[in-house]
């Protein structure tokens, strides 16, 4: 631990072995202290949030990932596929002049053409031109490539011309082929996910990256996941934020033994900040962590708490116990309660207002 501490204080990069040691150590407070130091050096006491809204065009999906409770088959009860115009009613009920981002994810629906997805983006951008469109995971881009016969770059260019501003971070899960096979991740492979991100960065797009931890992955796989992202960031500088998300159980009634421990949550945030040293921000996602642990995470290396969301559905389709959204005032209160400075941002971390 002393050797790692010296490296962190000197700004030296940690190795895979260092990361494993931190995961195997029970000295949570020292790990948190080091991550806090690394974050303060990078971001000071500022903690960022955005006024955003989650949108879901379709929950129909060809993949059958073991951890997903959001997906439906075509024709199954509860399945839906909405057009951009059908989404306007929901948006108009919740939108306000300070809304800065639509966060759009959904199923890999093979029953509609690629043009459907392009039209959804185009219609939103035309009706809400001032709102940033953060839409589709790298895995969805790989799916669109198969659906359309276009290359990743051609898919991205087509969506960008329609109004896409950035990709969401999902679809990464754990970047390990053993994990993806075991968990039935019927979507992009590790190499494909990374290649889509590389293509987006080549086109000048800044993107996001997640990790879904807490199921069958090994600690080595978690660390390797972080190293894959770190290596790509060395190459492209295209990632804005790393978002470690705890996997949710199948039901809100699930007992504590089915949930990721608070100890693991805090350690994962801290190790993420120490290992992924070249991505500016680590996000504490209150939907997965809950509000109290999100607040704690701000002294364990996190510098972002996501946003207002309005109504989250994917984690809540499983067993998330958190609120479906928070107000701006609640986010400011949460950040101030951790002794940090709340900063409202846009999607690209440009500061809108410091509280």
Image (cartoon, helix red, strand yellow):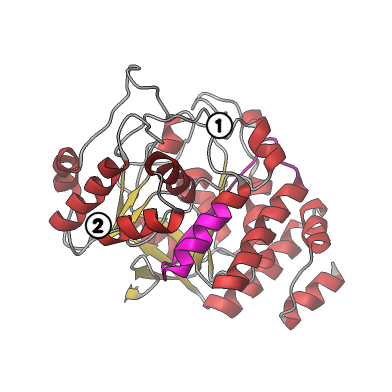
Residue picked out by circle 1: 67
- Cα gap from disc 2 to disc 1, whole angstroms: 32 Å
Instruction: Write down the region rendered in magenta.
Output: 193-218
Disc 2 vs disc 1: which is toward the camera? 2
Rendering coords of residue 37 (x, y %) = 65, 74
Left or right position of 276 against 338: right
Is residue 244 shown to the viewer in this render? no
Residue picked out by circle 2: 162
Residue drawn at x 70%, y 69% as measured from the top left: 34
Q: Quadrant of residue 101?
A: bottom left
Rendering coords of residue 122 (x, y %) = 21, 53
Q: Along the polypeptide, which appears first: circle 2 or circle 1?
A: 1
Q: Is residue 42 above or below residue 49?
A: below
Residue drawn at x 62%, y 48% as measured from the top left: 190
Rendering coords of residue 12 (x, y %) = 75, 78
Q: Is residue 92 above or below residue 162?
A: above
Q: Quadrant of residue 115?
A: top left
- Residue 162 lies within the magenta run: no
- Residue 203 lies within the magenta run: yes
Q: Is residue 141 above or below residue 68?
A: below
């Amino acid at each position: 631990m002393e050797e790692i501490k010296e490296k962190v204080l000197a700004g030296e990069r940690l190795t895979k072995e260092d990361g494993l040691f931190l995961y195997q150590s029970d000295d949570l407070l020292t790990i948190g202290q080091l991550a806090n130091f690394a974050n303060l050096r990078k971001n000071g006491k500022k903690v960022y949030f955005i006024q955003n809204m989650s949108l879901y065009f379709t929950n129909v999906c060809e993949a059958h990932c073991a951890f997903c409770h959001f997906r439906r088959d075509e024709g199954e009860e509860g399945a839906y596929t909405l057009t951009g115009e059908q989404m306007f009613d929901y948006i108009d009920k919740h939108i306000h002049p300070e809304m800065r981002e639509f966060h759009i994810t959904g199923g890999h629906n093979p029953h509609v053409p690629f043009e459907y997805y392009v039209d959804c983006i185009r219609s939103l951008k035309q009706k809400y031109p001032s709102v940033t469109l953060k839409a589709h995971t790298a895995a969805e881009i790989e799916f669109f490539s198969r659906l359309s016969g276009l290359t990743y770059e051609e898919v991205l260019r087509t969506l960008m011309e329609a109004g896409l501003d950035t990709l969401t971070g999902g679809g990464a899960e754990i970047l390990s082929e053993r994990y993806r096979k075991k968990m039935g991740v019927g979507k992009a492979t590790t190499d494909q996910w990374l290649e889509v991100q590389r293509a987006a960065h080549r086109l000048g797009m800044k993107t996001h990256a997640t990790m879904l931890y807490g199921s069958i992955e090994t600690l080595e796989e978690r660390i390797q996941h972080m190293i894959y992202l770190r290596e790509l960031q060395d190459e492209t500088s295209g990632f804005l934020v790393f978002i470690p998300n705890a996997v949710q159980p199948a039901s809100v009634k699930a007992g504590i033994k089915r949930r990721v421990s608070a100890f693991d949550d805090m350690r994962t945030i801290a190790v993420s900040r120490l290992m992924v040293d070249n991505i500016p921000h680590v996000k504490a996602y209150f939907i997965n962590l809950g509000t109290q642990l999100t607040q704690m995470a701000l002294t364990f290396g996190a510098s972002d708490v996501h946003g207002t969301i309005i109504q989250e559905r994917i984690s809540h389709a499983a067993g998330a116990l958190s609120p479906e959204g928070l107000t701006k005032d609640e986010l400011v209160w949460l950040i101030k309660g951790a002794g940090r400075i709340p900063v409202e941002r846009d999607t690209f971390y440009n500061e809108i207002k410091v509280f």
